[in-house]
Image (cartoon, grey):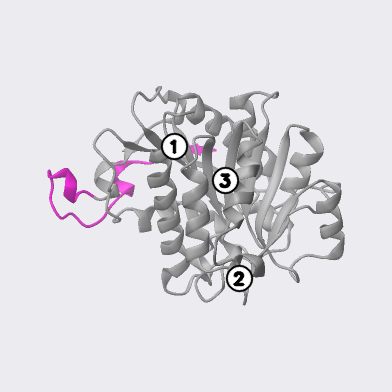
Amino acid sequence: MYTKITKEQWQGRIDHPTNRVSFRYHQVVEPINIQEIEESTTPTSTIIGFECEEGVRRNQGRLGAAAAPNAIRSSLSSLPWVLPTENKIQDAGNITCKGTNLEEAQTELGTAVTNILNSKSKCIVLGGGHETLYGHYLGIREAIGTDKKLGIINIDAHFDLRSYEVEPSSGTMFRQILEQDTNASYFVLGIQRYGNTMELFEKADELGVHYIYEDELITDTSQLYKSEIQEFIDNHDAVLLTLCTDVLNAAFAPGVSAPSPFGLSPQIVRSIIQFVTSHDKTMSFDICEVNPSLDEGGRTTKLGAYFVNEAIVSFKKGYGRC
């Protein structure tokens, strides 16, 4: 089900009503109807929300992520808008999963993502559980065609390569993609050595997944991992970036389905987002598994909004060179 967002849903502090250098997100965002989206003639990022946690329920996770899109919008509203006048930010509303109809909702999200990308806009998807990624993937694959090599970069503690023989969930998406799409490849950063079974490590190796452990990222002070990301990007025609917030240390992100006592710092995640989204091949970004119902003091939601802002600002560097 699709719902359009109104300007009244973007509220925040006003430092000046007309001086653009004082503006915040809520003063510049333009609500649009996804069915009526027009081709962008200036650098544009478009938000689409995915109010869904059916995949988390199927994966026996803690529920609450369906409320994240609007919660992240609320935290994003008062952040300063720092991009030049010609840059636009649009909000295309929410796709909502009704009941247990996950696959239908993912297809609907895919159509919305395709419409956004075909309008020459960068795409920001606000999940939802990490099942958001599969709908996001469907949209970018439709937009670029079946022959293009698609690189999927995931910042995550988990592989999400479980079997989908019984039903898809928030733990199956990457296996679905890799077994169904020979032109898609998968690179995941932040894997927890003790957060995945040996079977999942074996499946990752079998499917040719490239991965970097969480502790390797923490100790890589020279940021050599960026050369691996760059090599991965160079080998693909288009790139999708997805963030599962359970990759973060629980001290920074308590409001997730599967909190980690280890995990990455926000600084490392921020650095990866900046690096990947500033590349001209990166078309879209999603953030998943923020759970406002479990979020002490709104810390995870606010951090998620800051990550979204980092992606939007960094997209500006790569816009127009595709």
The residue wearing badge 1 is: 318
Instruction: Tell me whether the residue at label 1 lies in contact with that at label 3, contact meaning CB atoms closer than 8 angstroms.
Output: no
Q: Is residue 8 magenta?
A: yes
**Image point 85% across, 48% down: which residue?**
166
Instruction: Tell me whether the residue at label 2 lies in contact with that at label 1, contact meaning CB atoms closer than 8 angstroms.
Output: no
Q: Using the image, determine if residue 287 lies above or below residue 315.
A: below
Indicate which label's residue lies in the foreground, 1 or 3: 1
Secondary structure under the numbered disc 2 in the rendered image: helix
Q: CA distance from mark 2 to mark 1?
A: 29 Å
Q: Using the image, determine if residue 7 lies above or below residue 154.
A: above
Which percent across, then down, holds residue 44?
Answer: 38, 34
The residue wearing badge 2 is: 219
User: Amino acid type of disc 3?
Assistant: Leu
The residue wearing badge 3 is: 241
Position of 126 with respect to 153 (left or right) is left
Q: CA distance from mark 3 to mark 2?
A: 23 Å
Secondary structure under the numbered disc 3 in the rendered image: strand
Q: Is residue 264 magenta?
A: no
Part of the protein shown in magenta = 1-23
Give the class, few, some or many, for how many residues have Cα within 10 Å of label 2's Cα (few <14, many ≥20). Answer: few
User: Amino acid type of disc 2?
Assistant: Thr
**Image point 65% across, 49% down: which residue?**
131
Query: Which quarter of the figure has residue 281?
Result: top right
User: Amino acid type of disc 1?
Assistant: Gly
Chain-order first, disc 2 or disc 1? 2
**Image point 45% across, 29% down: which residue?**
321
Indicate which label's residue lies in the foreground, 3 or 2: 2
Which percent across, then down, holds residue 146?
Answer: 70, 24
Position of 198 with respect to 238 (left or right) is right
Give the class, few, some or many, for how many residues have Cα within 10 Å of label 3's Cα (few <14, many ≥20). Answer: many
Chain-order first, disc 1 or disc 3? 3
Which percent across, then down, holds residue 27?
Answer: 24, 45
